Amino acid sequence: MSTPDLSKVRVLLGVSGGIAAYKAAELVRRLGDAGAEVRVVLTAGAAHFVTPLTFQALCGQPVRSGLWDEAADDSRDGGGRAASGTAAGSAMGHIELARWAEHILIAPATANILARLAHGLADDLLTTLCLASAAPLAVAPSMNQQMWAHAATQANMVTLRQRGVFFLGPDSGDQACGDIGTGRLLEPDDIVAGLIALRGPRPLAGKRLLVSAGPTYEDIDPVRFVGNRSSGRMGFAVARAAAEQGAEVTLIAGPVALDTPLGVMRVDVRSAEQMRSAVLQHATVNEIFISAAAVGDYRPQSIAPHKLKKTGQGLALALTENPDILAEVAALPEHPFLVGFAAETESVEEYARAKLLRKNLDMIAANCVGNGCGFEAEDNQLNVIWRDGSECLPRASKLVLAHQLLARVLERYQASGRP
């Protein structure tokens, strides 16, 4: 069995007062599964959502919530050190706890705590620890979508990033308040994956990656188009994971409602022809091209200049094939290491391997779409295939899969003898 990615890493988890605080309990368990030693600090607001006893049961250590912890103070000798024979978890004052941490992670991180951190406040135990510790600080924001979009919050985010604070998320989607938008807490597995990536090593440092993601839309008239159900999440997860692993990433994105991953250069396109032009422009200056986009196979032969009206009869739509972007890149005299994607509904490995050979790819990642997996889903599973082998990556969040996929891509890339 491989060593857990956070084996014996000391993680101080700060939980602030938002509805997503309940997810922090699962996060403690996931951090423990990854091998981390976890201590939990609750803000006063967080204690209204989840009790300290919950976290104590999960991490096996006392939970701290205030600067004036009499039990901890009473267990110190005259020099401020933990008294002999006293358990470290209960004996730590805030300075000892700050020194103990190798990483500080705040999840969920509310708009309030981001503002307090940005202004250097130390008015409770958690913010005091953040100032008193030299450990790297990561925050996983969680708040209403309008609060996240507010200029004050965005300014605080910029300030914190400039100071070296790492942001894990936020995610987009349905929110507890009924809104839809950006501000959701990342899922616990994604937070753990992000923390692992922040620790390094950064195996893709110095590599240039091109990633395509999302659908393409082909206009029928000024109102209607032909498209597909790709959300772009898998491709965006690959771009994010590659950047987290140190790569210089260019993302060619079809029409999707997703935020650009931190550190990624994004080029927006709409049609297959636009994606083709963007990919060909960037392909030769990148060492690896991961084509996760769901490029439409067909487009209308002509686009009506005005909205088509009902006539009481059926409409015959003449279609023509779109260019095969991946095959065109593979035909270049000097092309990058090529990784394709294949979304299938049956005979997944058979069709994917045929596509690998037909398009002269180095690798292909295939998945069976439908039944809550693949398109429009948070999770995925991949069958990674190369010329003389294959490996199945079991169902997981798309970010976790992206990190796993990139490890296989780098392994095959190095085996190919490329610099």
Image (cartoon, rainbow, N blue to C red):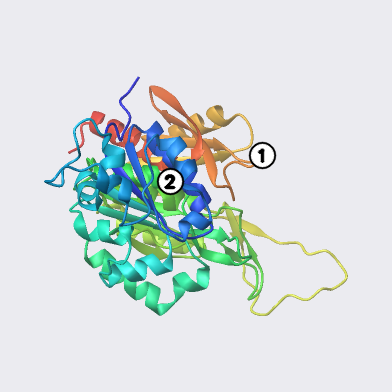
Instruction: Tell me the residue that label 2 is attached to.
Output: 190
Looking at the image, the residue that sits furthest to the top is 1
Question: Which amino acid is tagged 2?
Answer: Asp
> Local crowd at mark 1 within 10 Å, few (<14), some, or many (≥20)?
few
* Secondary structure of residue under mark 2: helix
Which image quadrant: the C terminus?
top left
Which image quadrant: the N terminus?
top left
Q: Position of residue 16 (x, y in %)?
A: 42, 58
The structure residue drawn at horizontal position 65% and vertical position 68%, both measured from the top left corner, is 220
Eye-nearest disc, 2 or 1:
2
Q: Please indicate, yes or no, whether residue 29 appears anywhere in the rendered image.
A: no
Q: Please tell me which of labels 2 and 1 falls first in the chain.
A: 2
88 and 187: which is toward the camera: 88
Q: Quadrant of residue 413?
A: top left
Q: Position of residue 156 (x, y in %)?
A: 33, 72
Q: Is residue 297 left or right of residue 244?
A: right
81 and 353: which is toward the camera: 81
The structure residue drawn at horizontal position 43% and vertical position 29%, both measured from the top left corner, is 385
Q: CA distance from mark 2 to mark 1?
A: 22 Å
Q: Is residue 144 above or below residue 103?
A: below
Q: Quadrant of residue 174?
A: bottom right
Instruction: Tell me the residue that label 1 is attached to.
Output: 371
Q: Please indicate, yes or no, whether residue 272 appears anywhere in the rendered image.
A: yes
* Secondary structure of residue under mark 1: loop
Question: Which amino acid is tagged 1?
Answer: Asn
Looking at the image, the residue that sits furthest to the left is 79
